[in-house]
Image (tube, helix red, strand yellow):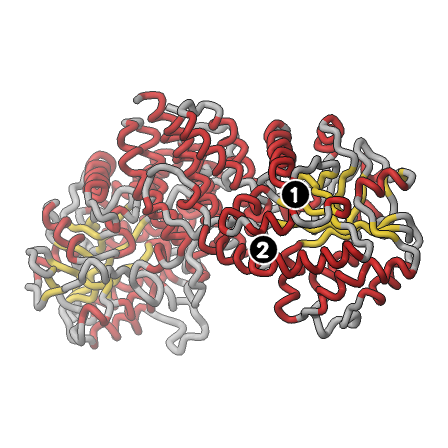
């Protein structure tokens, strides 16, 4: 292995209130300010602030040898603006090092890429691009879609919007026997594709502190050795940023692992590269072809869209959101538009997932609901109220 | 026991479909939201046997039987699929039969903050009974045997002589309801256990009471010490027994004779309230009730949300100007009030109830949209 390409998803949604039609108006009628603020502060304290500090230190101590990349969603950036200027500042510091590359995605970490018409998807990517420039002073040139949702159309659109590469899941059914540890390109378009090595990513993201795991405890030494034994060019390690301090608590030793990693990697003659450096360093070895009806993602064991659109509750809510787009836009009301876009955030649909097959605990993580059925009723109740607000507004203006 | 009243609920709900928003924001009409196929199927299953059942009741009447029918407007509208069903009820001996009024749409409208909807649906039902059966309703049975004081005052104003409601534990405190109870409108309370014996247990081979013959049932009643026993039974449940157990027909034919052996008379509720003195029952001044409890109708979060939006739609409807659109939307609004729609959101298997609720709220949302658009 020549290099490691780390990528972190940095995201928090605006969760819904336990909805009841009362006198609250606007955004706060649907979204729970108190709960979102509380979770933001909790995660900022346990993860974002200490993890950002660790990355900054690593860049400093290794003199820029350590590299990483991340995508900070617009919903989280909005929460930083509201409640955590210090968190925003530390992301800005990371951007200034030049060693941490920031990626674009849909501003709302949404399911807009699954709409048949792509206008909203493109709008949301542009919104994210503007926000990155405004808040972090960077202009991303690599794209990654919500939860690694990927198909040929998404790759085409990313290319059209000027991105050089797109990230997704290195699942067997698209690799067809090939290794994920190379640069690929998308079918029929000139955009590089970087594929997650889910085995070595999940060793850190999921299994790090699992005592049932035969390789427990995982050390940087052991993990770097596994990577070095692999024959590819790039080891793409993609995971939730909340792995550091939140999914894996501080006392599991996850920060020590991170701190020890650059030394172990350097000892084995490997480098850290950002996605941009990775695609500059290696030529595509093959093509990735994912039809629009076989969309992949990194979610659950199925690694398709079923985590968000697997049951009737989810599909019903999503269909309704899709149908509402035209009417929402006709109101030309900024607040209505904002609410609708935040209702498209993938997490709402994820909370309604009923698969519960080993992934259930992940689905309930950070959810305010006791069960996916509560989540379904609550989302539909909020959506129903919002929809009537949209039509009342249209009645007034038209 | 001196007398027995038997009342049949003749009703088939029109349930909501498994609906998909992708069908678009078009015009609202009944078939878009309600499962007509299922309703047709269920109606046909009942209609095919109405003649057999009513013949048995007719025989029973020759033996001294008297029966009250609580025919819902929802059911009557389904009779367009088989008009002879109406005739079959019409042919029964008018001396031995009475018709109870209830909210036309088998609705929970008595739980609305504004009672006008309830009042209108009761008036519709009275008119329907007059038109189709040529009879005046003296008896009122609320949907799901609901008992609420707000409604009883209105019923008194409307001139009802008798009200039938649920003899639930919170009202009866463990005693059997066996009298006419004093209220704004004299009240009979359903005997739950004996009604359920006929409704549900009759064909259950594992039940210790099986096989239930009229003599046995009459002897149970004879042992009870009171004025009048009230049985309220779903007509459709009697039909369901026919599939496995023809004995229900003999039971119906024999029951007046078996009761007579113990000196017990079958009465219409309007006769019973005239015949017996009214007993005080203080719980009627403070408690509410419904079949299997109020919480089944309006207990969980999804049901409260549905009710809240439904009431809101009722208000919005007042703004709709085009009379044809308004007529259809009002009809949909009223069908949405059927108690079964509420009950389905509160199944014992909570997951199923909530999954259904997401579907139902989605339908409600589309109707609200249509009402808002029509109000422009």
The kind of secondary structure element at disc 1 is: helix
Expressed as whole percent of the image width and height from the top left, the position of residue B291 reads: 70, 49
**Residue B143 - label:** 1
Q: Which of the two discs, 1 and 2, labels the residue nearer the N terminus?
A: 1
Residue found 33% across the figure and 61% down from its top: A299
Expressed as whole percent of the image width and height from the top left, the position of residue A264 reads: 25, 68
State whether residue A396 is above or below residue A357: above
**Residue B347 - label:** 2
Along the line of sight, the residue nearer the viewer: B278 or A190: B278
Along the line of sight, the residue nearer the viewer: B216 or B255: B255
State whether residue A359 is above or below residue A308: below
Q: Neighbour class for label 1 at 10 Å: few (<14), some, many (≥20)?
A: many
Side of B20 relative to B202 (left or right): left
Q: Chain of mark 2?
A: B
Q: Neighbour class for label 2 at 10 Å: few (<14), some, many (≥20)?
A: some
Whole-Å distance between the Cαs marked 1 and 2? 18 Å
Along the line of sight, the residue nearer the viewer: A320 or B213: B213
Residue found 70% across the figure and 35% down from its top: B136
Please say whether residue A376 is visible from this viewpoint. Answer: no
Please say whether residue A322 is visible from this viewpoint. Answer: yes
Residue found 41% across the figure and 30% down from its top: B325
Q: Residue A198 lies in what quarter of the image? A: bottom left
Residue found 29% across the figure and 53% down from its top: A9
State whether residue B289 is above or below residue A252: above
In what quadrant of the picture does the C terminus of chain B appear? Answer: top left
């Amino acid at each position: 292995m020549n290099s490691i390409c780390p990528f972190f998803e940095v995201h928090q949604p605006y969760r819904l209130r336990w909805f009841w039609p009362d006198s609250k108006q606007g955004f706060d009628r649907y979204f729970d300010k108190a709960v979102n603020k509380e979770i933001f502060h909790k995660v900022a304290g346990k993860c974002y602030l200490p993890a950002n500090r660790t990355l900054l230190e690593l860049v400093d101590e290794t003199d820029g040898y350590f590299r990483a990349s991340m995508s900070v969603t617009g919903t989280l950036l909005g929460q930083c603006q509201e409640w955590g200027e210090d968190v925003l500042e530390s992301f800005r510091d990371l951007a200034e090092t030049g060693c941490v590359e920031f990626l674009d995605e849909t501003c709302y970490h949404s399911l807009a890429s699954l709409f048949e018409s792509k206008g909203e998807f493109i709008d949301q990517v542009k919104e994210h691009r503007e926000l990155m420039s405004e808040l972090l002073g960077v202009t991303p040139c690599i794209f990654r879609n919500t939860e690694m949702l990927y198909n040929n159309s998404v790759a085409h659109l990313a290319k059209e919007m000027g991105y050089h590469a797109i990230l997704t899941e290195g699942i067997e059914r698209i690799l067809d026997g090939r290794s994920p540890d190379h640069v690929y390109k998308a079918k029929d378009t000139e955009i590089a594709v970087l594929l997650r090595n889910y085995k070595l990513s999940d060793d850190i993201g999921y299994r790090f502190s699992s005592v049932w795991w035969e390789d427990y405890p995982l050390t940087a030494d052991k993990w770097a050795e596994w990577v070095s034994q692999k024959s590819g060019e790039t080891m793409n390690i993609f995971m939730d940023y909340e792995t550091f301090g939140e999914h894996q608590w501080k006392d599991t030793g996850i920060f020590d692992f991170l701190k020890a990693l650059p030394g172990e990697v350097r000892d084995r003659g490997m480098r850290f590269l950002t996605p941009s450096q990775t695609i500059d360093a290696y030529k595509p070895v093959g093509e990735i072809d994912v039809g629009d009806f076989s969309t992949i993602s990194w979610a659950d064991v199925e690694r398709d869209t079923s985590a968000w659109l697997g049951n009737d509750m989810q599909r019903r809510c999503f269909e309704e959101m899709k149908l509402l787009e035209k009417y929402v836009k006709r109101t030309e009301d900024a607040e209505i538009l904002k609410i609708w876009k935040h209702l498209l955030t993938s997490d709402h649909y994820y909370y309604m997932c009923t698969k519960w097959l080993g992934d259930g605990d992940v689905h309930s993580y950070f959810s305010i609901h006791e069960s996916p059925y509560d989540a379904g009723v609550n989302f539909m109740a909020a959506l129903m109220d919002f929809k009537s607000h949209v039509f009342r507004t249209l009645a007034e203006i038209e | 026991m001196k007398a027995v009243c038997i009342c049949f609920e003749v009703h088939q709900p029109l349930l909501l479909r498994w609906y998909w928003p992708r069908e678009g924001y078009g015009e609202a009409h009944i078939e878009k939201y309600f499962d007509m196929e299922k309703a047709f199927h269920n109606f046909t299953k009942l209609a095919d046997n109405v003649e057999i059942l009513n013949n048995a009741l007719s025989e029973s009447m020759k033996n001294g039987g008297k029966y009250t029918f609580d025919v819902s407007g929802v059911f009557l509208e389904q009779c367009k699929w088989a008009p002879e069903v109406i005739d079959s009820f019409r042919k029964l001996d008018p001396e031995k039969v009475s018709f109870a009024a209830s909210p036309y749409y088998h609705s929970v409208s008595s739980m609305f903050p504004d009672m006008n909807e309830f009042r209108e649906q009761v008036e519709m039902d009275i008119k329907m009974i007059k038109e189709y059966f040529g009879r005046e309703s003296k008896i009122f049975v609320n949907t799901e045997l609901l008992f609420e004081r707000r409604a009883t005052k209105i019923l008194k104003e409307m001139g009802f002589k008798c009200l039938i409601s649920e003899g639930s534990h919170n009202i009866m405190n463990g005693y059997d309801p066996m009298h006419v109870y004093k209220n704004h409108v004299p009240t009979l309370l359903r005997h739950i256990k004996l009604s359920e014996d006929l409704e549900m247990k009759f064909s259950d081979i594992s039940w210790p009471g099986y096989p239930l013959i009229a003599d046995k049932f009459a002897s149970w009643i004879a042992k009870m010490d009171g004025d009048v026993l009230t049985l309220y039974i779903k007509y459709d449940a009697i039909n369901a027994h026919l599939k496995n157990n023809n004995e229900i027909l003999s039971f119906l034919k024999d029951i007046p004779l078996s009761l007579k052996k113990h000196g017990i008379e079958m009465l219409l509720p309007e006769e019973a309230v005239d015949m017996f003195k009214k007993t005080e029952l203080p719980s009627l001044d403070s408690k509410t009730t419904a079949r299997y409890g109020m919480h089944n109708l309006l207990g969980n979060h999804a049901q409260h949300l549905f009710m809240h939006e439904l009431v809101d739609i009722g208000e919005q409807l007042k703004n709709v100007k085009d009379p044809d659109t308004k007529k259809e939307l009002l009809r949909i609004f009223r069908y949405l009030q059927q108690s079964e729609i509420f009950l389905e959101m509160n199944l014992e298997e909570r997951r199923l109830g909530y999954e259904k609720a997401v579907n139902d709220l989605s339908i409600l949302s589309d109707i609200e949209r249509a009402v808002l658009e029509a109000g422009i």
